[in-house]
Image (cartoon, rainbow, N blue to C red):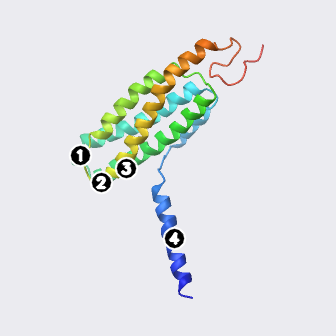
Amino acid sequence: MRRLPCLILSVCLCLSHAAAQRHSTALSEKEEEDVRDAAADPAARVAVYQGIIETRIKRIQAILGDKRAQGRRDDLRESMDEIAGLVDEFEDNLEEYDGAHRDLRKPLPKLIDATMRWESVLKQPPDDDSYNIVRRLALEAVADVKAQATEMLPAQVAYFKAHPPSKTANPGGVGLIPNE
């Protein structure tokens, strides 16, 4: 009989720990709508995710600029957590587009440049136990996207040189443009 309360307690603790491990993407309604609207065009979706992540990066820069702000550490941790979640989600999209040979030759160089900037900004806050783990996760996610984009670019150039896109193909690489 005493085991049941212990079991319930341990399950609750495990569930709360698992929930804390998940990243928050915290997309606004407009951002969610932008991501949905860009679903048919992979290059546009890359630009949308890049813009959303850039917004969080600018928020970190603003927080760092205001040395006297209340709750500064919490705001930095929250922004870094959002970046980690968004970049993980973005990486999943890149993997899907790479496997489906979606044409991302134009946005990839801009993405590679952006990831270098993101890494730089994420490294700017001083060490602090309240956000060091989340920062490490965000930096790892950004490094993964940077590596993936760096690998994808020459592979995409080679693929589309060998398989030029059809003139009737949709610019986003999804389906055909109907004859009018």
Q: Residues within 10 Å of mark 3 (few under 14, many from 20)?
A: many
- Reading the image, the residue beneath label 3 is 134
Tell me the residue at 59%/15% (across/down).
Answer: 160
Q: Amino acid at mark 4?
A: Cys
* Badge 2 vs badge 3, beta-carbon distance below 8 Å: no
Reply above or below: 23 against 36: below
* Badge 2 vs badge 1, beta-carbon distance below 8 Å: no
- Upstream in the sequence, badge 2 or badge 1? 2
Tell me the residue at 50%/59% (across/down).
Answer: 19
Say whether residue 38 is visible: no
- Upstream in the sequence, badge 1 or badge 4? 4
- Upstream in the sequence, badge 4 or badge 3? 4
- Reading the image, the residue beneath label 2 is 71
Disc nearest the viewer among 2 and 3: 3
- Upstream in the sequence, badge 4 or badge 2? 4
- Reading the image, the residue beneath label 1 is 126
* Badge 1 vs badge 4, beta-carbon distance below 8 Å: no
Separation of residues labelled 3 and 1 (CA atoms): 13 Å
Q: Position of residue 129 (x, y in %)?
A: 28, 55
- Mark 1, secondary structure of its residue: loop
Tell me the residue at 50%/43% (across/down).
Answer: 28
- Upstream in the sequence, badge 2 or badge 3? 2
Separation of residues labelled 1 and 4 (CA atoms): 34 Å
- Upstream in the sequence, badge 3 or badge 1? 1
Separation of residues labelled 2 and 3 (CA atoms): 16 Å
Separation of residues labelled 4 and 2 (CA atoms): 29 Å
Q: Amino acid at mark 2?
A: Gly
Q: Position of residue 65 (x, y in %)?
A: 24, 40
Separation of residues labelled 2 and 1 (CA atoms): 15 Å
- Reading the image, the residue beneath label 4 is 12
